[in-house]
Amino acid sequence: MTTLTTIRPVRAPWLRAARWQLRSQAAVGAWLWATMAVAATVVVGLLSRFADVEVSIFQFSRHGALWTGFAMAVIFCTAGLAAHVASGLTRAAFVRATVVVGVVVGVVYALLAGIGLELEGLVYGANGWSHVGSGGGVDPQHGFDPPSGLGVVPGLALSFVAGQLSGLLVGMAYYRLGGWWGTVVLPLTLAPIYLVGSPSLTTGQLQLLAPLDLSAPAAAIVSVAVLAAAALAYYLLARHVPIRSVQS
């Protein structure tokens, strides 16, 4: 007599943590993008009544997306590690989950920004309004034409992923090194945000590599290298980090 046993695939431990983090990020992201979309709509509506509409308003959503992603990464890194390890999972699984979630969320945020700019461009085009970036934002020479909103997605994806990884680095540095040294190394842990970008679309922050005037392919290569280095540094900080006891 043969006994048939149903074998279920074993889900990788890091996927369990990633799923929980993605659900939390999705809830925050839904509120974030809905709020920014409503705010941009209201501002455009008011400008059309009382002033000339000359620049993209939704372009400023990149600030909210970048720094909200950064803050969420810090929170997940510092608040989730102890619970993750206490549930029997490894630090390596935690690192993989947080990095993968950071990349996914960064890319999704960039897609949402591109779609929003595309829709805004259509509205601007229908009304004969200029759809370009403001000073210090999008380079007016590479301004948004109505059909080109999605063209900003690659540059924004790199920037938003940099914000996520920088948040993980900042959080883990404070968690492992303490407040004093965590603050001392801030120039390093924040560096991905200021090193990663696009030659035609800045993040609104100081661009440390701007004086090099890199071509788009070169900027992409440098950005990916910086992101990989940030992920490696985060792993090295987290792989043997002592778990702090949670006091009630």
Image (cartoon, grey):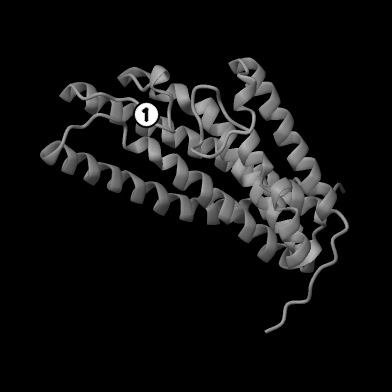
Could you say where residue 102 lies in the image, as x and y percent from the top left? Answer: 62, 44
The answer to whether residue 195 is above or below residue 63 is: above
Q: Is residue 165 visible?
A: yes
Q: Residue furthest left?
A: 49
Count of residue discs: 1
Q: Is residue 95 left or right of residue 216?
A: right
Choose between 102 and 15: the one closer to the eye: 102
Q: Is residue 192 left or right of residue 145?
A: right
Could you say where residue 15 lies in the image, as x and y percent from the top left? Answer: 70, 49
The answer to whether residue 133 is above or below residue 87 is: above
Q: Is residue 214 left or right of residue 135?
A: right
For the C terminus, give its image quadrant.
bottom right
**Tag 1 residue:** 133
Could you tell me which secondary element the residue under label 1 belongs to?
A: loop
Residue at image point 34% right, 37% down? 58
Could you say where residue 147 lies in the image, as x and y percent from the top left? Answer: 34, 18
Residue 9 in which image quadrant: top right
Residue at image point 75% right, 65% down? 180
Instruction: Identify which amino acid the numbered label 1 is placed on.
Output: Gly
Q: Residue furthest bottom?
A: 248
Choose between 195 and 224: the one closer to the eye: 195
Choose between 72 and 173: the one closer to the eye: 173
Residue 216 in which image quadrant: top right
Q: Is residue 125 left or right of residue 231?
A: left
